[in-house]
Amino acid sequence: MTGKVPSAHLFVTRTFSNRSCRRIASNYIVTFSKDTPPEVIDQEVEKAKASGANVKHVYKTALKGYAVQVPDDLVTALDLSHPNILAVEAEGEVTIQGQSLLRSAP
């Protein structure tokens, strides 16, 4: 694959040995390349809504994309073939266990 997301394929966030991710059912984050014009994102959001998805939030600054809730039976109805779509990931909570992130200065 060359960086394009195949139509109607959703990728689930990985689980690492020292991190865990709890998937939030039927919620996904669709991200676009940083050079994607806002109009293109708006068009893709409207297409997602037309397919029965509930767009929860549109990101246009630090991240370009949208958060979407999709009924399980409509996931395959989403058209995710736009060449500017970088990834589609299951929304989830990520936690880190057993690691100290802050250390005192020597």
Image: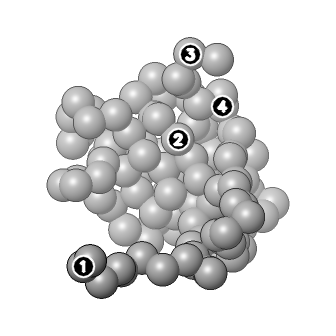
Return the disc, 4 or 1, that comes first in the chain's sequence: 4
In the rendered structure, which amino acid carries the disc numbered 2? Ala
Element assignment for label 3? loop
What is the x, y in percent for residue 56?
43, 71
Residue situated furthest top in the rendering: 2
Give the residue displayed 52% in from the left and 41% down from the top: 87
In the picture shown, does residue 83 fall above or below 51? above
Label 1 Cα neighbours within 10 Å, binned few <14 / some 14-19 / many ≥20: few
Q: CA distance from mark 4 to mark 2?
A: 11 Å
Q: CA distance from mark 3 to mark 2?
A: 12 Å
What is the x, y in percent for residue 20?
68, 72
Label 3 Cα neighbours within 10 Å, binned few <14 / some 14-19 / many ≥20: few
Query: In front here: 24 or 16?
Result: 16
Element assignment for label 4? loop
Return the disc, 1 or 3, that comes first in the chain's sequence: 3
Residue situated furthest front in the rendering: 106
Q: Which residue is mark 3?
A: 2
Element assignment for label 2? strand
In the rendered structure, which amino acid carries the disc numbered 4? Ser
Taking the image as shown, residue 20 lies to the left or right of residue 95, namely right
Q: Which residue is mark 2?
A: 87
Return the disc, 4 or 3, that comes first in the chain's sequence: 3
**Residue 56: which disc?**
none
Return the disc, 4 or 2, that comes first in the chain's sequence: 4
Give the residue displayed 59% in from the left and 30% down from the top: 5
Q: Which residue is mark 4?
A: 7
Residue 62 occupies which quadrant of the picture?
Answer: bottom left
Q: Quadrant of the N terminus?
A: top right
